[in-house]
Image (spheres, grey):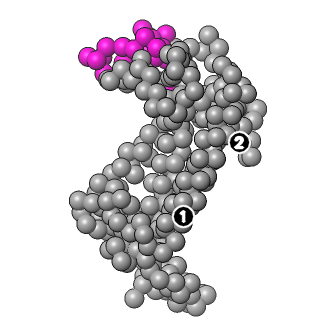
């Protein structure tokens, strides 16, 4: 899973078109997610995914943790910095939300097919994590180290890119779009896709947090606690019979 998450840190969207003044949403015309908390003067609706949800007023506070070179940054710059952090966490979370149950589902099958130790069995079939343990099993420590190095490389590249682009840098834009998903798309279509990425990332961050808490409290793999979501097709007798009859794939049997 950690190797999969590493790829997520490199999953950058293609260059995003600038938002013209005509496309901005006037703050007074848009709903405030929590009206009783008041509105932020910086969250004017011009940024994709801005629903006015900022109960702690973070958009007006520079939580500079020492990672930025500039200590006196404008609110607009700080907000873009936060948006990039949200995008990168969301991209990682989307991969993690998929990789977490997938490795719990397929690790027993793959370990049997490849004749490798079933490391997850040592921690009750759960994914390795700080709460679940298992971070010292097999190749996990080396994967974590490689993951950290790749993330550091992405951070260095991000800092360098911001220096080169200057004030015109766009959050999460690393020019990575091999499939040309945004190529030739209209401004409205680009904003729509960017909003979908943000919303899916936000949902994924909630999902992966739920996985961690659920496994810690439930003392069982998330696939066992929610079988109606994660029962793999190869566990259905009809599919097993078909695979065994058509291809003699006995490894799909779970007994």
Q: Which residue is mark 1?
A: 143
Residue range (magenta): 26-49
Residue located at (57% from left, 27% from top): 69
Residue 49 image offset from top left, x and y in percent: 49, 28
- Drawn side of residue 52 relative to residue 251, left or right: left
Comes first in the chain, label 1 or label 2: 1
Q: Secondary structure at mark 1?
A: helix
Q: Quadrant of the C terminus?
A: bottom left
The reply to whether residue 208 is in sight is yes
Q: Position of residue 115 (x, y in %)?
A: 53, 87
In the image, residue 179 sits, relative to residue 76, either above or below, namely below
Residue at the disc numbered 2: 176
**Residue 189 visible:** no
Q: Is residue 50 magenta?
A: no
Between the residue at mark 1 and the residue at mark 2, the CA separation in whole angstroms equals 24 Å
From the viewer's side, name the closer residue of 23 and 57: 57
Mark 2 element type: loop
Residue 132, by quadrant, is bottom left
Instruction: Specify few, some or many for label 2: CA neighbours under 10 Å numbering under 14, 14-19, or 20 or more.
Output: some
Residue 253 lies, in percent from the top left, at 46, 86
Residue 127 at x, y percent in the picture: 40, 65
Number of the label disc, if any, that sits on residue 15:
none
Q: Quadrant of residue 16?
A: top right
108 to the left or right of 88: left
- Mark 1 vs mark 2, foreground winner is 1
Image check: 202 left or right of 24?
left
Prevailing secondary structure of the magenta residues: loop
């Amino acid at each position: 899973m950690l190797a999969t998450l590493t790829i997520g840190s490199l999953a950058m969207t293609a260059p995003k078109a600038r938002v013209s003044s005509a496309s901005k949403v006037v703050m007074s015309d848009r709903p405030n997610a929590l009206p009783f908390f008041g509105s932020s003067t910086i969250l004017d609706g011009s940024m994709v995914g801005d629903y006015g949800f900022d109960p702690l007023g973070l958009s007006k506070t520079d939580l500079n943790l020492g990672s930025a070179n500039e200590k006196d940054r404008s609110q607009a710059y700080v907000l873009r910095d936060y948006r990039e952090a949200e995008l990168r966490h969301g991209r990682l979370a989307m991969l993690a939300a998929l990789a977490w149950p997938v490795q719990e589902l397929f690790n027993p099958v793959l370990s049997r097919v490849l004749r490798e130790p079933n490391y997850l069995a040592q921690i009750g079939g759960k994914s390795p994590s700080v709460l679940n343990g298992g971070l010292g099993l097999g190749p996990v420590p080396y994967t974590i180290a490689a993951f950290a190095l790749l993330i550091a490389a992405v951070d260095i590249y991000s800092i360098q890119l911001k220096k080169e682009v200057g004030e015109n840098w766009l959050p999460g834009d690393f020019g990575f779009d091999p499939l040309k998903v945004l190529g030739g798309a209209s401004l409205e279509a680009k904003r729509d896709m960017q909003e979908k990425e943000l919303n899916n990332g936000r949902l994924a961050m909630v999902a992966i947090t739920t996985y961690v808490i659920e496994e810690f409290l439930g003392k069982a793999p998330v696939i066992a606690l929610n079988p109606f979501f994660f029962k793999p097709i190869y566990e259905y007798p009809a599919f097993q019979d078909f695979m065994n009859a058509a291809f003699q794939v006995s490894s799909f049997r779970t007994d």
